[in-house]
Each structure stands twice: as C-alpha cells, then as structure tokens.
Amino acid sequence: MKAKPWMAGIAAAATLFASVIAPAGAMAEEATAPSTPATSTTCATNGNTVTVKGTDADAFKTWNGKTSSSNRTFKVAKVANYKIGDGTSGGSVHLETVAASETSILQAMQELKSNDGTPLYQNKDLQGDPMNWLANTGQDSLIRKYADNPGVIGTVLEANKVSVDDTNNTMTLTMTEPGLYVIFDATQPKKQTKDTGDTTVEYAGFNNMLVGTPLTAGCNVSNNTGTVNLTSNANAKTGSTTTNRGGFQFTKVGVENDRTGLSGAEFTVYSDEAFTTVLQDANGNEVKATSSEKSGLVDFSGFKLNDGIYYLKETKVPNGYWSGSAAKLQVTMKNVDGTIQLDSIIGMNETAKVLLTNGDNGYAYRNIKSITQLPLTGAMGMAILGVVAVLCIGGASIIIVRARKTKRSFAA
C-alpha cells in the first residue's frame, strides 16, 4: 500500500486542515511489508508553531462592537509525535500516537466505519499506529470525521501564544513542542460580530483543526510548513457574513397645488410603538428627516439601520394642513442578500391607512387640510359618516331643546 498525500483542506466553511504524512517506507515498516524507505539528508522538525492564513485577520479576533478586545481562545491537544529515523542515506518520518491519549483516540477511530458499519481501523497489530494510519488513508471525509470527534479534549492555549498579524492576515499558534495537534476554537460565543456602523460582519468561528507543526523540506512531507492557507481554493474559507446597513425613503404629498410634493413635513423614527424613544442609527445619529422642496421626498436612505421594525411619526405638519392627518407608520426593514432594505410601510391607524399609498413610484403619504378631504372608503368612510351622524344628532338635540325653551316662554 502506497501512502497518499494528506491534503490540506475540506471543502466546507471554516474547516481547516494541514498535515504531515509518513513517507511510503514508514507505513510499510509499520505494516511489516517490504518497501524502500523514503529518505532525506535534512529531515528534522522546524519549530513548534501552526499558522493560519486568511483574507481577513479580524476573523481571528473577538469583538465588542467596533472594538476588538482580544484574540480568539483555543484549546489544543497533541495527538501524535513525529518519529524521525536516520539511515545511511538520510532520514524518514512518520506519526506516532501520543501514548497518554491512545485509548481515547482508538475509541474515536472506531467511529470511522465503512458503508456496512464495520470499523475501518481494527487494531495496531493489523494496521499499525492509528494516527499514522489515518494520515495515510488520504480520505478527506475520514479525516474530517475524526477531527469532529477526536477523542481528546485539549487544554487552553495561553493568550500570549496566540498572535495575529493584521498586515499579512495570519494567526500563529505556538505549541509547547513539535507534533500533530487537534486545535479547538473555544471562543465564547463562537460567533463574533464586528460592527463598523455602516456594516456588520459575523465571523462564524472555526471547526476543529487537525494540523502539524513544520518539518524541513527534506522530509518529503505533504504540507510540511505547518500553515493552513485559507486563500487557496483547495482549502476551506473562513466562515463570515457581511451585512450592509441601509435606510429608506418615500414621498410626502398634499392637496391642491401640493399634489406632487409637499415640503416642510418633519418625520422622526422611534424604536417603540408608543413613540417615546427616538431611534439612533448604528452611527449614533438621531433618525429624522424633513420632506424636501418641490419633490416632497422624505429621505432616510443615509441612515444605517438593522433589519427589524421601526415606528415613524410625523412630528411637524406643514402650515395649513390638518394635524389629524399626521403620519403614524410602521416601517419594516429586511435583509436582502446582505443589504438592509425597506420591506414595507403600513399605517398604524385608520387615518394613516387611507392616506398612505404604494404605487409604481414607491410609497407616498398625503396630508389633508380638513377631515372632509379624507377618502370615503372602508372603515374610514364609516368613521366619517359616524362623526357626521353624531354631529347631526347633536345639532338636532340643540334645536329641540331651544324649541322647548321657546314654547315654555310663550306659555308663561
């Protein structure tokens, strides 16, 4: 059986792999099969670091709004040593499972099964060292499955052993000694959100990493640099989602000469339905706007809003217009393909419902100068008729009372 290179990377978000592999001779030695060991005149360990290279160094950090408070927290567990042998023509290297963790690692190996449910790894006598066997399977799916459930827990790597290089978009982890490690992202919460004001970036964190520290080039080992390169298409990418905040706009119109646009109407957005707390956007600006001259445009597009529900109130009605026609609206913002956009505007009372329209040019809200200019439709029409009926009844009552008083005066 010829050993295959242990590939760096599984095509899934935030899955990281780099590895070492025993050359063909090392596998053959463990399986007691004849072969010629791969040799090198310079095979040796080359430090005890692991480097992860990405496209955004901020993925390696924790965030509190716009500020990074620290780097992510990691736990590490060494699962294999490098066994390097020197011969007359050079050196060879293979993996040797850490004795203290061998029992739990062997149990984890039993979960790697064939289609009929048979464990693929049986025992050391038949297949040699378990970690060396896994490396030489060359099967990414098996390696991923083991990394997800490696049979080890790990201990927290000290904060001073995790460093981030913003210029080169890399993170370096310094281990206590060379070897093969399982690295766990122990950051809480694992999902971290960077808030720039204009955007939010959610970093999903990292799946377990199975990665080896560097070896010299002479060892003939695949991925011998101890580096996971997330910028390569062969490797997984850092899981992150960027959302661009946004605002909305609509048109303010009036009656008569103001039918195409009404200026001077002030609108304020509140965070609560009772209109008690003026909203501030992600940049700390109060969300207010005034309808423009001629066009009557009410433009909130420059504000940086999240998705969600907001409450819009007309806090200043233009001169000459009925205050009862002031807008009270519910505005819903929605995330559409990573950009916050207007989803809907609805009236919060019957007056607002009939004065708000949504046509080919978008939403428009009409002010009126008196209640008689309200459209006589639906519930609003019934309400107006009710008001008129009450006024008529009231007027009739006054006439009757006066008539009775007049009659009594004649009778006296």
Image (cartoon, rainbow, N blue to C red):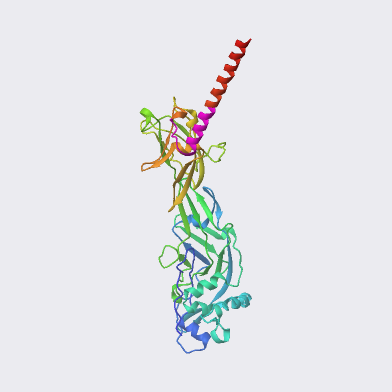
Check the image and report above or below for 83 versus 198: below
Q: Does any portion of residue 408 appear in the rendered image?
A: yes
Check the image and report above or below for 335 versus 207: above
- In-image side of 374 versus 120 (left or right): left
> Magenta stretch?
373-391
Image position, residue 54 (x, y; %): 45, 60
Residue 219 lies within the magenta run:
no
Image position, residue 40 (x, y; %): 44, 79
The residue nearer to you, when weighing 139 against 78, is: 139
Residue reaching furthest to the front: 411
The residue nearer to you, when weighing 230 against 161, is: 230
Image position, residue 146 (x, y; %): 54, 73
- In-image side of 383 versus 157 (left or right): left
Residue 380 lies within the magenta run:
yes
Magenta stretch: dominant secondary structure:
helix
The residue nearer to you, when weighing 276 against 25, is: 276
Image position, residue 286 (x, y; %): 50, 37
Identity of the residue drawn at 60% across and 71% down: 152
Identity of the residue drawn at 57% across and 77% down: 109
Identity of the residue drawn at 46% across and 82% down: 24
Q: Does any portion of residue 268 appear in the rendered image?
A: no
How many labels, in total?
Answer: 0
Check the image and report above or below for 245 versus 410: below
The picture quadrant where one finds residue 365 is: top left
